[in-house]
Image (spheres, rainbow, N blue to C red):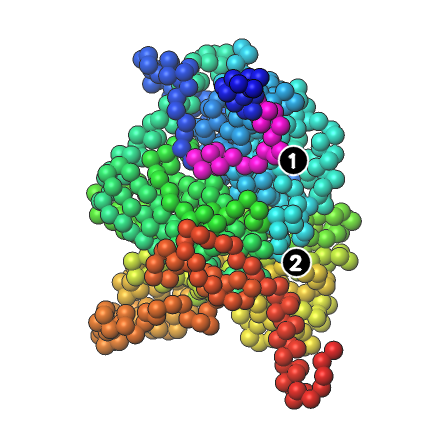
């Protein structure tokens, strides 16, 4: 009776107050967790209820793709970042509701798919916000993966497309920019212990008004990074690529009308949903499984389990990632749900259904299951700057269960392929250039990974990264004009370091780098796979080798070449085994390395790896083995010991009968080594992970998760996951050295 307002008015007042006084617009779980295209808008429903002219749809689709291709090429020609020059970018178009419909035909689909999320955030929160709004001529920037993205080095420009005052589509351009002001140069800090070490964390916000970049916001962003010139130039490049795309879209609208564009964008999505459902229905009902293990946090060695089960039932597919490693609250290798789905989507479009239009609708028929607070479903506060560690796995591991599900299909949509090399094996750099400019970025070697072996032929060498089929390696001469890095290894293929099989994988290549003409320069890496094979095989092949990072320090290679140019061969195995330079320090390390300053002329060496092999090595054509020897891809020992081929070492003529005897002998030896499955399980399987192995993830039950917290093993229920905390490696090393010193003193000297 004392209420001034009735209960309904109270609720309305409360709702209005909360909507107008929200403390913080963080990522919206309803947006981030929804990978599907939205329902038809009223306008789409109206237009699609009428007869659709397929010829006009096809014509408009062709015009849109041509416009996207032009925008992509503009960025490649004008961009300043290494990623812009070598194809690590995309231009895309979305429906008015923000669903990705088409990308440039040689763009990075994952970059476009991740903009699906920030555009929906803009529509939901900024459209009616009186201080922001969405109007013609506006442009929004974004890079924080937590709002939908890959990692914070990728910056997107997004612009609404209006026609006659109505929003009809969204346009975007995204580039891997690299430098973003993080605690280590180059934007991918392995040393980040919190999200506040990651540099720029831009939720989607307006940076363009009336088609012009706001100079105050541009200055703020430039002031937040090491390379303000890069930030300035590529903001302009992305904007003008989007403006060119807008110009082309306006011509299409003028010629064909808004109805034709709206129908084309929506029809492109719905046709894909229907086709994916049909393809899933072709598969046999059942479940196939695979596990993968990153072996490093980039600061210490830990086995981090990624657990995948794919279940098909009718025309629905469920991807179950439960049982994967818990998140690590002070390491930068976590990723979030949207990022993981985006890169898994990329893997499907590159390796499983590459003939489908590259749009978000591909995943609409799929369901996902994740454990919250896991490595692949990290919470908002976890650092995610090097999310590439689980994300690169996401693009390849589905090859194995999908190959098993599709093995007996009468029709396949691409060749069955074993996983390609799935590590970002490249040097990240930072410092002062020979021109006195402060820079930080990455080398384009990441774009030349070895492909897995295929069901009908060998994998391609150094063909592309798993995230895009059209990236380039970059031109060494152009790089050396801008930065002081000098390449001493000319992309030499890694002999014998390959996934063996009936069809071998493609090989990666060696990277040998140093620098000169700079007084302040350093390197870091962001890669794992030095202890556990990165690329898994398929149907009896061999996985890729494990690869170390190698260094030759304490020398200036340019001075050594003046003294003895013939005595130094730029081959990693030769340099590390023969050690031809006196006084140098030769060392091998895990492939994860935080940023360290180097001296001019010191060598940093690593391998771009190989994919997994396909099929039994004893089924490989002996002639193909000899061809590999002739091309210096494998050694004589590999031909004999792995492939069991008998041949003349001079003429390389195969002894066919001798090869048959060797292979039959090896098959008998395999049988002799074999044991019944139950006996194998009894001898091999343990109740828990071995005590000496730092292990994170499920063991035999996906509902029970192991982790490593502050140096101690912990065990948790999967539905109550807590983040793991890793000790500082320097503190661990100091404690170990103190123990050794105490033991050397015989416990008789008091400690400080």
Residue 734 image-quadrant placement: bottom right
665 on left or right of 98: left
Residue at the disc numbered 2 = 595
The structure residue drawn at horizontal position 39% and vertical position 73%, both measured from the top left corner, is: 637
Residue pushed farthest front?
Answer: 1
709 above or below 401? below
Q: Which mark is residue 234?
A: 1
The structure residue drawn at horizontal position 70% and vertical position 62%, both measured from the top left corner, is: 598
Q: Identify which residue, 431 or 136, lies in the foreground.
A: 136
The structure residue drawn at horizontal position 41% and vertical position 41%, both measured from the top left corner, is: 345
Q: Is residue 367 magenta?
A: no
611 on left or right of 435: left
Q: Which mark is residue 190?
A: none
In percent of width and height, residue 262 lies at: 43, 18
Residue 399 visible in this rendered orientation of the protein: no
User: Where's the C terminus, which quadrant?
Assistant: bottom right
255 above or below 313? above
Cβ atoms at labels 1 and 2 below 8 Å apart? no
Residue 484 image-quadrant placement: bottom right
Q: Is residue 31 magenta?
A: yes
Of mark 1 and mark 2, the one earlier in the sequence is: 1
Residue 695 image-quadrant placement: bottom left
In percent of width and height, residue 554 lies at: 70, 70
Secondary element at image label 1: helix
In percent of width and height, residue 68 lies at: 50, 28
* Circle 1 or circle 2, nearest the eye: 2
C-alpha separation, residue under disc 1 versus residue under disc 2 = 25 Å
Q: Magenta part of the protein: which range?
A: 16-34
Secondary element at image label 2: strand
Q: Identify which residue, 291 or 241, lies in the foreground.
A: 291
Residue 408 visible in this rendered orientation of the protein: yes
162 above or below 500? above
């Amino acid at each position: 009776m004392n209420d001034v307002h009735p209960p309904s008015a109270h609720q309305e007042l409360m709702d209005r107050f909360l909507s107008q006084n929200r403390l913080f617009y963080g990522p919206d779980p309803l947006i981030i967790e929804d990978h599907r295209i939205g329902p038809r808008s009223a306008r789409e429903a109206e237009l699609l209820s009428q007869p659709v002219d397929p010829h006009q749809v096809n014509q408009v689709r062709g015009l849109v793709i041509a416009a996207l291709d032009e925008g992509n090429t503009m960025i490649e020609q004008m961009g300043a970042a290494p990623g812009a020059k070598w194809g690590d970018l995309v231009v895309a178009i979305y429906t008015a509701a923000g669903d990705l419909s088409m990308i440039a035909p040689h763009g990075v689909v994952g970059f476009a798919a991740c903009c699906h999320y920030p555009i929906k955030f803009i529509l939901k929160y900024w459209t009616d916000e009186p201080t922001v709004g969405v109007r013609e001529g506006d442009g929004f920037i974004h890079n924080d993966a937590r709002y939908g993205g890959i990692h914070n080095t990728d910056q997107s420009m997004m612009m609404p497309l209006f026609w006659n005052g109505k929003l009809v589509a969204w346009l975007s351009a995204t580039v891997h920019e690299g430098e973003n002001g993080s605690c280590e140069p180059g934007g991918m800090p392995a040393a980040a212990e919190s999200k506040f070490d990651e540099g720029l964390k831009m939720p989607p916000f307006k940076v363009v008004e009336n088609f012009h970049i706001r100079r105050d916001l541009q200055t703020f962003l430039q002031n937040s990074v090491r390379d303000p010139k890069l930030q300035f130039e590529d903001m302009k490049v992305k904007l003008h690529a989007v403006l060119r795309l807008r110009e082309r879209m306006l011509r299409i609208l003028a010629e064909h009308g808004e109805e034709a564009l709206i129908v084309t964008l929506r029809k492109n999505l719905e046709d894909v949903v229907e086709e994916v459902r049909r393809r899933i229905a072709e598969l046999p009902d059942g479940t196939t499984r695979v596990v993968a293990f990153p072996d490093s946090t980039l600061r210490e060695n830990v086995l981090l389990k990624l657990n995948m089960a794919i279940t098909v039932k009718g025309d629905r597919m469920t991807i179950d990632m439960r049982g994967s490693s818990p998140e690590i609250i002070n390491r930068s290798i976590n990723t979030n749900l949207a990022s993981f789905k985006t890169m898994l989507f990329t893997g499907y479009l590159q390796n499983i259904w590459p003939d489908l239009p590259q749009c978000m609708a591909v995943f609409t028929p799929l369901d996902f299951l994740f454990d919250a607070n896991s490595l692949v479903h990290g919470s908002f506060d976890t650092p995610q700057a090097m999310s590439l560690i689980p994300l690169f796995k996401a693009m390849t591991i589905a090859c194995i269960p999908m190959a098993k599900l599709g093995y007996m299909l009468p029709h396949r949509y691409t060749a069955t392929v074993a996983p390609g090399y799935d590590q970002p094996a490249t040097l990240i750099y930072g410092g002062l250039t020979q021109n006195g400019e402060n820079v930080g970025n990455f080398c384009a070697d990441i774009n030349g990974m070895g492909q897995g072996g295929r069901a009908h032929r060998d994998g391609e060498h150094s063909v592309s990264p798993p995230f895009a089929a059209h990236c380039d390696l970059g031109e060494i001469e152009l790089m050396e004009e801008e930065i002081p890095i000098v390449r001493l290894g000319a992309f030499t293929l890694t002999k014998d370091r390959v996934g063996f099989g009936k069809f071998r994988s493609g090989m990666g290549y060696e990277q040998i780098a140093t620098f000169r003409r700079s007084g302040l320069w350093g390197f870091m890496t962001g890669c794992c796979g030095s202890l556990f094979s990165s690329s898994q095989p398929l149907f009896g092949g061999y996985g890729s080798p494990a690869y170390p990072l190698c260094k030759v320090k304490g020398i200036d290679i340019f001075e050594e070449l003046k003294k003895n140019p013939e005595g130094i061969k730029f081959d990693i195995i030769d340099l590390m085994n023969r050690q031809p330079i006196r006084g140098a320090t030769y060392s091998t390390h895990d492939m994860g390395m935080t940023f360290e300053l180097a001296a001019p002329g010191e060598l940093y060496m690593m391998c771009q790896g190989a994919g997994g092999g396909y099929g039994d090595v004893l089924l490989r054509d002996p002639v193909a083995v000899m061809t590999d020897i002739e091309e210096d891809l494998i050694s004589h020992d590999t031909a004999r010991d792995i492939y069991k081929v008998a041949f003349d070492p001079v003429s390389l003529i195969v002894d066919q009968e001798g090869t048959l005897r060797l292979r039959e002998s090896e098959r008998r030896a395999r049988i002799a080594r074999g044991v019944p499955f139950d006996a194998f399980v009894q001898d091999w399987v343990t109740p828990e992970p071995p005590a000496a192995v730092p292990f994170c993830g499920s063991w035999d039950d996906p509902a029970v998760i192991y982790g490593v917290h502050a140096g101690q093993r912990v065990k948790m229920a999967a539905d109550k996951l807590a983040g793991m905390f890793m000790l500082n490696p320097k503190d661990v090393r100091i404690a170990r050295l103190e123990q050794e010193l105490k033991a050397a003193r015989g416990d008789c000297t008091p400690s400080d």
